[in-house]
Structures are given as C-alpha cells and as structure tokens.
Amino acid sequence: MSNPSKAFARADRRPAGQLRPLHSTHGFLHRADGSAQFTVDKTSVICGIHGPVEVKLRDEKLDRATLEVVFKQHISLPTTREKFLETTIQSTLEPLIKTALHPRTLIQLSFQTIQNDGSLLAAAYNAACVALIDAGIPLQSAFAAACIAILPDGTVLMDPTADEEEQAASVHTFVFDSATMGESGAYMVHSNGQFTVEQFEKCYQYAKAAAKHVIEFLKVVHMPSGSRAEAEAEDVVMGE
C-alpha cells in the first residue's frame, strides 16, 4: 500500500505501507499447554498458555473461566508499561475466548518480550492468537493485529519501528477478528496521541490490509506439519 501523503525516508528503506518480515513458531514450550513466538523483524514476543487449570477460590467465576495475563520484558524490571499491556490484552481477549465452556477454571497467558523494536502490542496479540489455537482453547474467532503510526507531517506508517513510534504524533494498534476482517469495524483499537478523523480513517485502511496479510500468514503457520510449525514471510507491499 503506497502512502499518498508526503514522502518519508524510513531507516530500513521500506515504503510507508509495507510490513517487515514475519516469522512465527508454535508448540515449543513443553511445560505449557500452548505456546507461540511471533516475530516482526527485530520485535519478538513469546506467549505461553496454561489452562484451563484449577483456579484459586477467590478468583473463581461460576459461569466462566478466569483469564489472567502476565507480561514480562526481557531484561528490565516490571513497570507500569507491563501493567498497561496486561490490562489491555486481558480486556480485549476475554470476549474473544469462549470462557463459558470452562467455568470455575483459570486460563493464564504469559508473555515474554524477547526484543522490542516497535509494534510490540500488535506482535503480542498475534502471538496470543497462535498460542491459544495451539492450546486448543476455543475462540469466538481467530484474530490478527496491526500497528500504524502517524508522523507530525501526516505521513502514515504501517508497522512502525521503535524509532518511528518515538517520532510519531500518534500510534494506533488495531485488532480484527478473522470472521469479518474489518468489514464491520475493528474489534479493538488502542490509540495514543493526537490525530484527525481523516488520518484515523487512513490508519484503519492500512491496519485492515496488514491484518489480512497476518491472518493469511498465520494460516500458513498452522498448516498440518507435526507438533511444531514454522513459517516465514518476505517483505510484502500491501496493495491499495
């Protein structure tokens, strides 16, 4: 997808509407019920699933499973950023997981950042989707996420790096369910910064195109190939 706004030279020489290379594996954490690692160039996140397992009495819900999200950075001590990620991911995924099928149990999602070069929240959502499927946790729908940034000059960037996020006037993470893929709107949007309605609409179109590509990529990852699946995607410029 070529950006009709002003030209911006990205450090990695990508066009404004281009994803970085994708890579994903699943089923490698043997002590977890499901696991996945989702990598977008230099951003990489692992998600491990434990459950459904016994839940502490104080956390028990009679009509559905309790969802717990733990997010850890690779080397740094816990900060408010991790708490934000935990809360955001939990509130987004709770309605997407068929928790009513496992009442009075616990489903825990544990995230570990291996490397962060931007678009971290989107990578975490994509890792979670693969890990939940790997664990056999029933979902309302598979889902995919994409991150979009808007620079102060109005340039819209797909899949921003950490440096690009730092320069951005606003950063947006979209989650789409695979059943509708944005035809009835995004399932979740988290936006940070200042932007216009026109800029947001452009972000939405970029994100929808990126998420469609991620969903197709994840389908390749989950083609039957034994207990471990692995796939890679080359750089793909999204079409208009």
Image (cartoon, grey):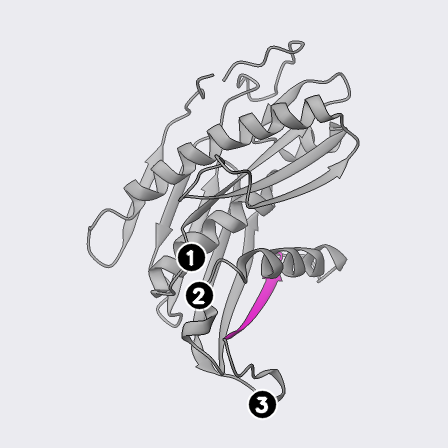
Q: Which mark is residue 105?
A: none
**Do callouts 2 and 1 mark residues in contact (Cβ within 8 Å)?**
yes
Pointer 2: what residue? Answer: 98
Specify the amino acid type for callout 2: Lys
User: Dot 2: few (<14), some (14–19), or many (≥20) neighbours within 10 Å?
Assistant: some
Pointer 3: what residue? Answer: 57
Q: Earlier in the sequence, mark 3 or mark 1?
A: 3
User: Dot 3: few (<14), some (14–19), or many (≥20) neighbours within 10 Å?
Assistant: few
Specify the amino acid type for callout 3: Leu
Q: What is the secondary structure assignment of the residue under circle 1?
A: loop
Task: Give above or below for 234 relative to 90.
Answer: above
**Residue 71 among magenta residues:** yes
Mark 2 vs mark 3: give the one in front: 2
Pointer 1: what residue? Answer: 140
Which residue occupies 31% across, 41% down?
A: 231
Task: Give above or below for 33 relative to 154.
Answer: below
